[in-house]
Amino acid sequence: MSSKNESADVIVIGSGIGGLTAAALLQERGLSTLVFEKNRFPGGSCSSFQREGYRFDAGASVFYGFAEGERSGTLNLHTKIFKKLGISVATIPDPVQIHYHLPQGFALPVYYNLQTFLAALSARFPREEEGIRKFYQELVDVYDILSAMPAGSLEDPAHLFSVGTSQPLSTMALAMKTFRSMGKTARKYMHDEELLRFIDIEAYSWAVQDALSTPLVNAGICLADRHFGGINYPVGGSGAIPEALCQGIRKFGGEVRFKSEVSEILVENGVASGVKLADGSEHYAKAVISNATIWDTFNRLLQEPRYRVEEERFLRAPSWFQLFLGVDGSVIPEGFHVHHVLVDEWESYNKPGGTIYFSAPSILDPSLAPPGKHVVHAFVTSEVDEWQHFTRGSEAYKKAKEEFAAAIISRIESILPGLSRAIELQVLATPLTHERYLNRFKGSYGPLLKAGQHILQKPQNRTPVKNLYMAGDSTFPGQGVIAVTYSGVSCASYIARKFGKPLDYLS
């Protein structure tokens, strides 16, 4: 026990989904939690905001983990967590994950029905049909293994022993697949260069890396689960997820404090003891969870140079340029899908701005826009270096944003003619916006694995500082809402067992 008054058993820095998940599960288990968030709303990049009657997703809009059914284990985590908390989050199923628009007129919707999707892909590459089916079966095999295993910390010997002894064959099979990449597995079965490019964009659409750099295990979660649990959109937008987690934290006696920015992690004799806020106040706890990036945690919030993490230690995920548009509803044709990915040329798909991500979630949830209107969210990868020479609020900055946005809108009009004329509201965000609002180093979405590294080389929940833990996209398994949710479950599982109140497995 610290000699100073403790504000809670566990303090969480930031209200991203990983941190909120950990706090909610720990609070339900009887450990007191206190979450500090710099903004006036929770969720980080999985939040929502409103402008002139439109409600926009700040980042993510493709959601896994909300399926109902009998499967247990690591998947359908949102369903399991909210069931555990006794909280309801209404969702709307989406029959198509992504509609791809690729070079040489290659357009393909990824349908919820796996056989429909495989038939459509095989029609484009009839000579590769057998390989296509064998490759996607590999992903289903990974999914089946994972969905049969309970979620828990890979750093918890008790959890690993429990899983290993109860399911030895599945554990061994998963261990073998852990060291394989999605790209190498694809090349085992397929040879057509355009098809392998498609496998790359399948990876890039959620991992922001090509298939060779994407672990097979991660691919098995996302690219198989979309055909089992499916894609489900939370009613009211992405902000419904963090709001529900906050509700769960409060329900069991925890606290989430907004407009409370953490400026320093307090360390005494190599042990994390609490945090200092920007207003100078200090708060103490038995454990601290950082939801910040690995660079922000060790290079900004921790003061001791010995903990510093060099930027080059990992690949840094890019930041984004985002367009939030309120449009006249007539521009969206009947039968238009919600989520789209546009690639003009393969040579630049993984370069800044090369791939356009596009969604219109008001197709599923009309409450996001005024009657007769739609919300449109488009974004491309971008870097702080492209924007940092501008002065925030200056006319030059505003003009540069508008010109950049106009070029993106022009490209989108290849699938949505007349978009530029239908815009009634436009809100633009650069990597500087991500850096400022989310306190993310260079606006980045965390570290990525380098080609040749396997998934277990991703940072885990424990850190070199005793009693300091991490959750979020800097930790295993990586980027994406369902991935950071897993990181929160893993972190809570480790801490709860350490303090003698182990979590019940989610079911």
Image: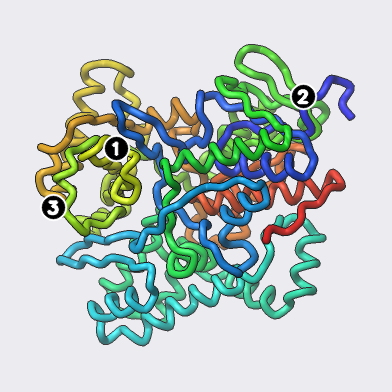
**Nearest to the observer: residue 435 or residue 504:** 504
Question: To which quarter of the image does residue 418 belong?
Answer: top left
Badge count: 3
Give the Cα distance between marks 2 and 1.
41 Å
Counting from the top left corner in percent of width and height, residue 309 is at 60, 38
- Mark 3 or mark 2: which comes first in sequence? 2
Residue at 21% from the left image edge and 65% from the top image edge: 107
Q: In the visual, does 240 lie left or right of 33?
A: left
Query: Label 1 belongs to which residue?
Result: 369
Counting from the top left corner in percent of width and height, residue 292 is at 57, 35
Q: Quadrant of the C terminus?
A: bottom right
Give the Cα distance between marks 3 and 1.
24 Å
Give the Cα distance between marks 3 and 2.
55 Å
Element class at badge 3: loop
Counting from the top left corner in percent of width and height, residue 492 is at 71, 47
The mark closer to the camera, 3 or 1, is 1
The mark closer to the camera, 2 or 1, is 1
Residue at 62% from the left image edge and 59% from the top image edge: 456
Please name the amino acid that badge 2 sits on: Ser
Q: In the visual, does 378 lie left or right of 74?
A: left
